[in-house]
Image (tube, grey):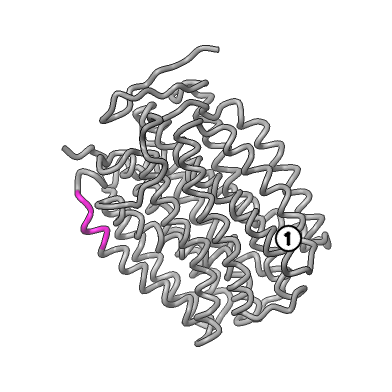
């Protein structure tokens, strides 16, 4: 088997990969892996109201239940990032996809709380591991190709999310049970993983003597906090949009997946156009302007008591958030404060805690005050992202490696 050596920035380490990271095969596999990551997470969203109803959960209980998903992901992400650094991305993604496929049918059918909690932890670990490792691969592939690709990669994540939400919602509206819909998801995930695995990287990206994990510091910490807030907005759309439309806007349960569909549609379009935007628009503008637009959308969701305006609000949130995270991940690939595999693992763990642990916290806030207040607070936090975006070094966020 041929080996390919690529010099990593700032070190004398080499990456042994099959295929080479700048090949079309690696690019296509990365795109398909992002599609898998988005599809697996979003397929769960339309099933949440059924779990809530089947188990008789309150908002607070649902928030606590969703915390299991966050626990699984937060624990698994640093481990997955470290393993990807030592052994490559291929088999970590394969095992994580298998974990998702085994746990989703349990989540869609069981009413035994301890069993559901365990399945959700496994599901969260699988989704979190995929999300972390595909970003490690994306950073390597983008730099090897010397071309702007991160928004396109994340765009496929959004395409996967859109397909997952629309597909499962459609099956449910046609009379399929949640369990039957989950089996369809499992078949598609297994087929996609089979096609993607040969093109995923297998080589080690750092020396054996390096640390397995490091806490983010410096500019990496700032980027991680920004990702946390943006992912919190996305997590609210995934985990709470259906519940919000059901309980607050009184939309029929069969159509409550439309909230996430509105969010994912505009995010998908924005990210698919993102690589072109990044070449012509300042990264600072994309981060600050996008976060302000998302803040406006979230406030629209919570303030105007008309379900059509709620869908419009979610659409604005998706459009605003679309290219914030891809720009920040590209910046992580350029920074020199931390080795890239540690930086990606650290900000993915911190950032994705917003999409995983954040919605659980929203459940407790909703129980104490109400759900509109909990979601409205995210709009305020998105304004904070705008302020932090103004603090990032110009050269780093606009695509140049700082000296």
Q: Residue at x 49, y 50 (%)?
A: 269
In the rendered view, does 234 fall on the left or right side of 14?
A: right
- Name the residue carrying label 1: 107
Q: Residues within 10 Å of mark 1 (few under 14, many from 20)?
A: many
Instruction: State the count of labels.
Output: 1
Q: Position of residue 217 (x, y in %)?
A: 28, 52
- What residue occupies the far bottom of the structure in this picture? 369
- Residue 391 falls within the magenta-colored stretch: yes
Q: Is residue 128 above or below residue 139?
A: below
Which span is picked out in magenta?
A: 388-393
Q: Hey, which quadrant is residue 115 in on the image?
A: bottom right
In the rendered view, does 130 fall on the left or right side of 388?
A: right
Q: Residue at x 47, y 15 (%)?
A: 3
- What residue occupies the far left of the structure in this picture? 403
Q: Residue at x 33, y 52 (%)?
A: 216
Of the pair 314 and 403, the residue shown nearer to us:
403
Q: Residue at x 73, y 58 (%)?
A: 170
- Residue 242 falls within the magenta-colored stretch: no
Of the pair 233 and 217, the residue shown nearer to us:
217
Q: Position of residue 372 (x, y in %)?
A: 51, 81
Q: Is residue 102 above or below residue 23?
A: below
Give the dominant element type of the magenta stretch: helix, strand or loop.
loop
Q: Secondary structure at mark 1?
A: helix
Q: Position of residue 205 (x, y in %)?
A: 41, 30
- What residue occupies the far front of the structure in this picture? 209
In the rendered view, does 224 fall on the left or right side of 389?
A: right
Q: Is residue 242 above or below residue 165?
A: below
Q: Hey, which quadrant is residue 288 in on the image?
A: bottom left
Which quadrant is home to the N terminus? top right
Which quadrant is home to the C terminus? top left
Q: Position of residue 234 (x, y in %)?
A: 49, 61
């Amino acid at each position: 088997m041929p080996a390919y050596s690529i010099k990593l920035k700032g070190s004398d380490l080499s990456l042994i990969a099959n295929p080479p990271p700048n090949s079309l095969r690696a690019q296509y596999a990365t795109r398909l892996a992002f599609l898998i990551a988005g599809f697996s997470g979003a397929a769960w969203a339309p099933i949440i109201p059924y779990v809530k109803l089947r188990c008789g959960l309150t908002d607070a209980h649902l928030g606590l239940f969703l915390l299991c998903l966050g626990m699984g992901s937060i624990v698994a992400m640093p481990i997955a990032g470290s393993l990807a650094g030592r052994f490559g991305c291929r088999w970590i993604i394969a095992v994580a996809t298998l974990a998702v496929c085994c746990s989703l049918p349990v989540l869609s059918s069981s009413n035994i709380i301890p069993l559901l909690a365990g399945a959700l932890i496994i599901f969260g670990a699988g989704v979190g591991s995929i999300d972390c490792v595909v970003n490690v691969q994306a950073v390597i592939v983008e730099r090897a190709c010397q071309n702007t690709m991160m928004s396109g990669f994340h765009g496929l994540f959004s395409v996967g999310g859109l397909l997952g939400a629309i597909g499962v919602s459609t099956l449910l509206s046609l009379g399929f049970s949640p369990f039957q819909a989950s089996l369809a998801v499992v078949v598609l995930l297994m087929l996609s993983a089979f096609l993607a695995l040969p093109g995923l990287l297998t080589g080690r990206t750092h020396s054996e003597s390096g640390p397995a994990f490091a806490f983010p510091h410096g500019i990496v910490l700032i980027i991680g906090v920004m990702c946390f807030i943006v992912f919190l907005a996305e997590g609210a759309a995934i985990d709470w949009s259906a519940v919000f439309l059901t309980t607050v806007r009184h939309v029929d349960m069969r159509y409550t997946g439309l909230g996430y569909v509105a969010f994912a549609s505009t995010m998908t379009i924005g990210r698919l156009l993102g690589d072109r935007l990044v070449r012509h628009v300042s990264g600072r503008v994309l981060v600050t302007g996008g976060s302000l637009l998302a803040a406006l959308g979230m406030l629209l969701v919570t303030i105007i008591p008309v379900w059509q305006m709620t869908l419009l609000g979610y659409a604005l949130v998706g459009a605003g958030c679309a290219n914030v995270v891809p720009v920040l991940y590209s910046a992580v690939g350029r920074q020199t404060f931390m080795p890239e595999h540690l930086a990606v693992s650290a900000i993915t763990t911190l950032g994705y805690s917003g999409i995983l642990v954040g919605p659980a916290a929203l459940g407790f806030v909703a129980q104490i005050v109400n759900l509109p207040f909990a979601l409205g607070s995210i709009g305020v936090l998105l304004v904070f992202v705008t302020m932090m975006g103004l603090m990032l070094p110009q050269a780093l966020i606009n695509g140049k490696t700082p000296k």
